[in-house]
Amino acid sequence: MALRFGFWPAGIRMLECILDVYRRSALQKPRHTACRGPETVTGAQPAVSVIVPCHNATEYISEALDSLRAQTFRDFETILINDGCPDTANLERALEPYRGEILYIRQENTGPAGARNRGIRVARAPLIAILDADDVWEPTYLELQTGILRDRPEVDVLYPNAVFFG
């Protein structure tokens, strides 16, 4: 299957080529699973499932999750995969303030791809977004990305420009 890529913002050279927000229909059909994420406030299917794989990122996870709290686009679920983090006790303490906002899954280490795939299997939304545990998003990130996918149905996959810091 060929995927159609969108580039945002147009004409700017991408620093990283990471698939970031994409339509589930661009991937293999999801398998049915008994594991489901928490209901959104309205009880409806969320528009976006944000997958956060986490391994050795305890010191950064609060910043990543705070950047999700700051999103202007609010129709999303957050699925955090503890991918065999050697610092699980401290990670779980850091996650306490977010417990009502995330679906937390703990698994043996399978690497970033395995953790992302686990999140995709339990995701309920038609759009998937990947936020690494040591990254942050600007407050309008999801609003802009979902807007492009809404306005340009021929686009299946987006990835943003990146700013390196720290």
Image (cartoon, grey):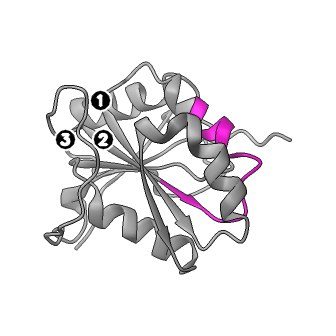
Residue 83 position in % (x across, y down):
56, 70
**Front of the two marks 2 and 3:** 2
Judged from the image, the secondary structure of the residue bearing numbered disc 3 is loop
Label 3 is placed on what type of residue? Pro
Residue designated by label 1:
75
The answer to whether the residue labelled 2 contacts the one labelled 1, judged by CB atoms less than 8 Å apart, is yes
Q: Which residues are magenta?
A: 52-66
Residue designated by label 3:
153
Q: Is residue 1 above or below residue 94?
A: below
Task: Specify which label sits upstream in the sequence, 2 or 1.
Answer: 2
**Front of the two marks 3 and 1:** 1
Can you see residue 135? no
Q: Is residue 98 above or below residue 103?
A: above
Q: CA distance from mark 2 to mark 1?
A: 7 Å
Assess whether residue 165 is covered by the magenta stretch.
no
Farthest residue toward the top? 72
Residue 50 position in % (x across, y down):
41, 46
Q: CA distance from mark 3 to mark 1?
A: 19 Å
